[in-house]
Image: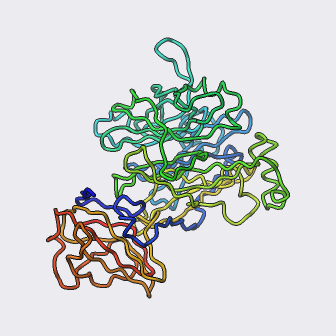
Amino acid sequence: MAAVNIGKTRQVFWDDYLVDTEKTTASARMIQPTKKECVFEFDQKNETFSISYPCVVKDEAGYKMYYQPWIKEGFKPCVCVIESVDGIHWHRPHLDIFDNDLAENNVVIDQVKDGVFVFYDTNPACPKEEKYKAVGVAKIQYSDGEEKTALCCYISSDGYRFTLSHPMTRFGTFDSLNTAMWDGEKYVCFYRSFHNIIGVDNSEILDISQIYSHSKMWSYATRDIRVMYSDDFRHWSLPELVEFDDGKDYPLYTNNIQIYDRAPQMKIGFPVRYCERKEWTKNVEQMTSYLTKKKATETIEDRTGRVATDCIFICSRDSKMWHRFNEAFLTPGYEEEHNWIYGDCYLAYGLIDSGREYYNLYTIDRHFSFGYSKPLNRYEIRKDGFACYMAGGDEATLVTKPIVFDGKIPHINFSTSAYGYIFMSVLDEDGREISGESFEIYGDNIDRAVYFADGEDFSRFASTPVRLKFRMRDAKLFSIKFE
């Protein structure tokens, strides 16, 4: 087994990349976020029908959250923005860029076709006038003179005034929040398409007009995620269907894929899981939100009230193969008038660092509760705490694959109960112990230095392949980094 060189990078215990599963008895678990409070109320007249695709962007001034209120007549959304310096207190900037009779006119893009994603481009070579980029569906003139629908790029220097710039691709459907980012080496874009289309080979790459020409697509095809790459955000590779290591194939709506800043070799995502029931039953009629579901069906289309959505957690090291937890990361919650309907659990794109041990995440709820204001609800999740390896009330162990590290002192993100503990030791490549154990580690901290009980320095094992062993009871291990 070849050693994994981790250097001084933070390594998260969300998958088995570092874990020797044959020697490990601790269990991999996903962790759900904790719901906190409503931090903003969307109550302007263009916001009470429906809101989609909140997207958080960090820039020099703080945070911008872009979102799309849908106008009932014709369902033509625009893109609006609210702002915050701390992720807790939000306000609408009064912009007046477009003619609008809103009390607080915070519209930044008028009359878009579907999902629009905004990000701040961190590529050092990016021109100043393109530092903000938006990705969305639009009709644009091609070089042959024909106007075509495509996934397009809008550009802006200030995050408020956007100009439709150029097409990116036509190979997909794009009816979702399609995400893009600079990953330090290249641009990566993740977007929506479909497979299992009747009469179409899954290996075929179809453009948007070809896909929509298949009349049975909505009933039988599977919503999926595609990935493509670019060096300049203008010329893109052909799309590839992303893969999941669980062998399952089910519909995913948004992808919410982003780089995880504390371990930038990792990409994480929070896709919405699309769950369509084929019929109304006596159980549905007993649900607290039955009338809301029925109204959505009558106002939008038949399937709308029969769909429920939740959110899952995925992670990847190469953008193509993804580790997926099939347990829900976020559920609609206890039944009430406005939940258990299409549009629940759409996490806002992006994490906001609280400055403490957790990140803030957000949802805009009451998606299809027409005529009601929409609450922006805040959640908290521990840093590195989307998943972990854990031991219950009985002792269990985690043994890594052979690794090579740099540094003198390991730092772990962990939690235990008062009864719990973690002990760490070093093994050779063959699994023989070559160190004593660390001091007993107990408590709850995102950055705890680990020391040998005999006072020896971990640096004696640096730059040579070794395994790490964690002996645990009633404990969770989230990440490790050597310094």
Percent across and percent down for residue 456 are 16, 80
Looking at the rendering, which quadrant does residue 177 occupy? Answer: top right
Which quarter of the figure is the C terminus placed in? bottom left
Which quarter of the figure is the N terminus placed in? bottom left
Judged from this view, the residue extending furthest toward the bottom is 419
Looking at the rendering, which quadrant does residue 356 occupy? Answer: bottom left
Judged from this view, the residue extending furthest toward the top is 144
In the rendered structure, the answer to whether residue 94 lies left or right of residue 396 reads: right
Which residue: 17% across, 83% down? 455
Q: Nearer the viewer, residue 479 or 434?
A: 434
Looking at the rendering, which quadrant does residue 335 occupy? Answer: bottom right
449 versus 115 height, above or below: below
In the rendered structure, the answer to whether residue 282 lies left or right of residue 457 reads: right
Judged from this view, the residue extending furthest toward the left is 460
Percent across and percent down for residue 171 are 52, 28
Percent across and percent down for residue 68 are 60, 42
Percent across and percent down for residue 187 are 37, 38
Which residue: 45% across, 50% down? 322
Q: Nearer the viewer, residue 199 or 379?
A: 199
Q: Nearer the viewer, residue 384 or 86?
A: 384
Which of the colour schemes (rainbow, by chain, secondary structure, one colour) is used?
Answer: rainbow
234 versus 332 height, above or below: above
229 versus 274 height, above or below: above
404 versus 180 height, above or below: below
